[in-house]
Amino acid sequence: MPRFRLLVAYDGTEFHGWQRQEPPGAPPLRTVQGVLEDAVATAIGGARVPVMGASRTDAGVHAVGQVAAFTADTRIPVDRLAMAITARLPEDVCVHRADEVHPGFDPISDCVSKCYRYSIAHGADAPDPGLLFTRRTTWVTRHRLDLAAMRATAACIVGTHDFAAFAQANHGRESTVRTVFGCTVHEPAPGRAVVEVAGSGFLYNMVRIIAGTLVDAGRGRTTPDDVRRALAARDRTAAGPTLPPHGLRLEWVRYGAHGSEP
């Protein structure tokens, strides 16, 4: 039976995250996985099949490069599959690519790296009408941020570390050691900052805590040495705040075995 890989984008504002949630005795919550499984079942005209995602994004988090996969028989040509599924999705989700892949392809375990970005507007002296159109995807702070200080602190994040200080309590992982391949701070426009973090994998809320720590650095409240001490102490209280979910977006997921780049 063929297996298909999907490249999925969504505005996470109205979703309870990626993962399907069916509380006992209550209607299912609206999740990206849930609406995608509904759309796939309707498109292929068969039974509902599991659609596995590479990253279980939280409520309010967005994506342009989420990767999902399912196994099913369908008469729809693969070059028309993305359009067929998207036509049955709500307007805040779309499938912008579909490929047939190796039957053993696993979007989670085959992943070798992924990248998130956090978008920030900062230091406005007057109301910015542009934020009316990006308010669902950009976190706003009135404080003017020192991006050079943020970049210097971001460099301390890169590498293989125990990131216990950058994970929410009860994260559910046996190991808190992760490898960050890159942590950068860009200035796409005056008064805007974008934090990008790429790594082999992330702990619960890890990227939002990294972004919060870099914002503290941009305000002069945290130094590179503070970050090094937090990593060594493995103490959540030593790192910065967890920024809200709406500024976060999953950019891309890359693979090694069983497939090339999505």
Image (spheres, helix red, strand yellow):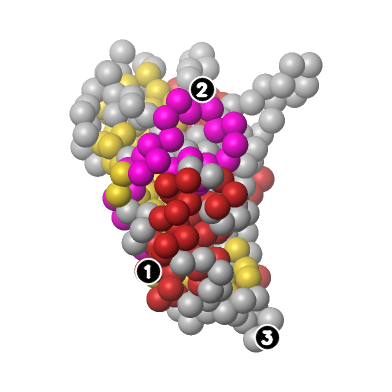
Residue at image position (34%, 61%) is 155
Residue at image position (54%, 53%) is 239
Q: Say which of 251 and 204 sits in front.
A: 204
Q: Which residue is mark 3?
A: 126
Where residue 196 sits in the image (x, y, percent)? 40, 58
How packed is label 3: few (under 14 Cα within 10 Å), some, or many (20 or more)? few
Give SS at disc 2.
helix
Q: How many marks?
A: 3
- Separation of marks 1 and 2 at Cα, in angstroms: 48 Å
Residue at image position (68%, 85%) is 126
Where residue 233 sits in the image (x, y, percent)? 47, 46
How packed is label 2: few (under 14 Cα within 10 Å), some, or many (20 or more)? some
Where residue 67 sits in the image (x, y, percent)? 39, 37
Give SS at disc 3.
loop
Q: Amino acid at mark 3?
A: Ala
Instruction: Tell us which disc is closer to us: 1 or 2.
Output: 1
Tell me which segment is drawn in magenta: 161-185
- CB under 8 Å between discs 3 and 2: no
Q: Which residue is mark 2?
A: 41
Q: Say which of 159 and 60 sits in front.
A: 159
Instruction: Tell us which disc is closer to us: 1 or 3.
Output: 1
Where residue 251 sits in the image (x, y, percent)? 40, 51
- Residue 102 higher or lower than 61, as above or below: above
Q: Which residue is mark 1?
A: 152
- Can the viewer see residue 123 in this picture? yes
- Can the viewer see residue 62 in this picture? no
Quarter of image, res 84: top left
Q: Amino acid at mark 1?
A: Ala
Q: Say which of 155 and 182 sits in front.
A: 155
Assign the C terminus to one quadrant of the image: top left
- Residue 221 higher or lower than 212, as above or below: below
